[in-house]
Image (spheres, rainbow, N blue to C red):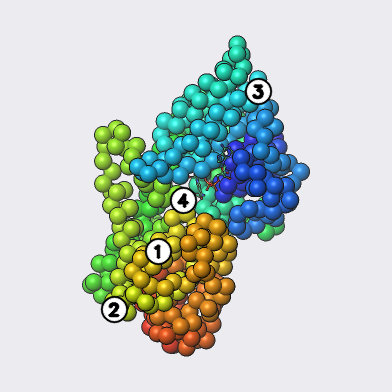
Amino acid sequence: MAQKICIVGTGYVGLTTGICLAFLGHEVTCVDVDQAKISALHAGDVPIYEPHLRELMALAAENLSFTTSYADGVADADVVFIAVNTPTAADGSPDLRYLRAAAQSIGETLGDRFTVVVNKSTVPIGSGNWVGAIVRDFFEATHPGTPGNFQLASNPEFLREGTAIGDTLYADRVVVGSDDPRALEVLSNVYRPILDQTFTPPAFLPRPENFGVVPLVSTDLASAELIKYAANSFLALKISYINEIAQLAERVGADIAQVALGTGLDTRIGRRFLGAGIGWGGSCFGKDTAALITTAREYKLDMPIVAAARETNQRQRELVVEKLLEELRIIKGCTIGILGLAFKPDTDDLRDAPAIDIAQRLISRGARVRLHDPVAMGRLAREFPELADCLRDEPAEVVTGADAVVLATEWAQYRQLDWKALAPLMRSPILLDGRHTLDRQRLTAAGFRYIAVAAWNPP
Ligand code: NAD
């Protein structure tokens, strides 16, 4: 049954969720405090780069509205999803000011009908109760004498930028948590078309072959909150683990690509997230591993495995500088090109992107840096104006006269470059493949000295 849904925060998560739920037939209002975003959405523009999102938005248009007014979205909603940003504060804990502001505005604008207020943002364990208390305080302050008619739930999000729609419509699982059975019931109804796969897939994103029903994990509030951190930290561990093995592989003369393949084919382990390279980035793994450690500390627990995964990840970035130093001897005055800026392909998200960190490390050692990305350059100029002069429109401009080039994001476009034409443009044709993604033989035949973060031969 179609529900009235309000989504608070129209970023990567909120906008994708809102559009997908509207596509499934729910009546969705997306609220954001950013007037520019809402104006862009009114004009039919999607303010982030996410494949097919604009097309799905057009398909869902009649069920979808955008506003900066909480009253318009919250007052008669069955479900209010909070999807605001929860960045990391200076001490490693999540900065909850946006969540607090959203909870306050929801409390002020809730109506009389039963509403489920859902944390979709990744929030520290216990935040459900905390948000509930804020909503209640502000509801009572603005509705004296009226008892609040809402319940709190958690619905952690697992989508990946770049494949966000597929991850939502064809999810591995849906997790909902609440201490109130009614709230769990409402949420399972919201997700029913996804759980039972009863919707007609959009033409551009067919249902994967043999895709069955989607499991629902319906649990208490604290368990749902912990599932998100446990899942993200585990994925981060996997990447750091293979990066640690990659360093040993290089020392003993083993090929990390073969080691990862032979390890990952064990179904208990799985092949995904076993790609050695410059490590993870993005808005989630760094933030969520830090938050898990901080939460554990509040309970007098150490998380040494998670802490080590974070250290290894930092080391991978410095390793790029070390590898370049080995090759060039002196980095000062050298020109280094970086291809790929977004933290992964198919997104323009630059949060905690390894490429930016590596560029800054190289600049601080006196290198001149040139940067290119197929979609994230506009965002880089806005968010890192100090690097704007380093941007170049074409990969050829990045490599011309360069002493080395680093591939930092495995965009498909870079695999297809005419590397043969690029090699002669460089002062010294050194290519450091930070994602272990290019064809070593092809690059070598094109005239490059091909190096990687750890010794590997593409299978
Ligand atoms: P984002 O920064 O892209 O979007 C957040 C949006 O919230 C922005 O548009 C901002 O203007 C809006 N906002 C901030 N304060 C607001 C308020 N008081 N009222 C209304 N709108 C407000 O963030 P995101 O990447 O979508 O992440 C949102 C949450 O989801 C975070 O907790 C994140 O950890 C989690 N998450 C993100 C991903 C991902 O891949 N990006 C995946 C899973 C979970």
Q: From this view, report whether residue 106 is shown above or below residue 292.
A: above
> Residue 222 location in percent, x, y?
42, 32
Please name which of the two marks, 4 or 2, marks the residue nearer to the observer. 2
Dot 1 falls on a residue whose secondary structure is: helix
> Residue 103 location in percent, x, y?
54, 30
What is the spatial separation of the Cα atoms under label 4 and label 1, in whole angstroms? 18 Å
Q: Mark 4 vs mark 2: which is more N-terminal?
A: 4
Q: Mark 2 vs mark 1: which is more N-terminal?
A: 2
Mark 1, residue position? 360
> Residue 319 location in percent, x, y?
31, 67
Pointer 2 with pointer 3, Cβ within 8 A:
no
Mark 2 neighbour density, 10 Å: few (under 14) some (14–19) many (20 or more): few
Please name which of the two marks, 1 or 3, marks the residue nearer to the observer. 1
Please name which of the two marks, 2 or 3, marks the residue nearer to the observer. 2
For badge 1, the amino acid type reads Gln
For badge 3, the amino acid type reads Gly
Mark 2, residue position? 329
Q: From this view, report whether residue 391 is shown above or below residue 214.
A: below
Pointer 4 with pointer 2, Cβ within 8 A:
no
For badge 2, the amino acid type reads Arg
What is the spatial separation of the Cα atoms under label 2 and label 1, in whole angstroms? 19 Å
Cβ(mark 4) to ligand 1 < 8 Å? yes
Mark 4, residue position? 283
Name the disc covering residue 111, or none: 3
| Residue sitting at the far top | 145
Circle count: 4
For badge 4, the amino acid type reads Ser
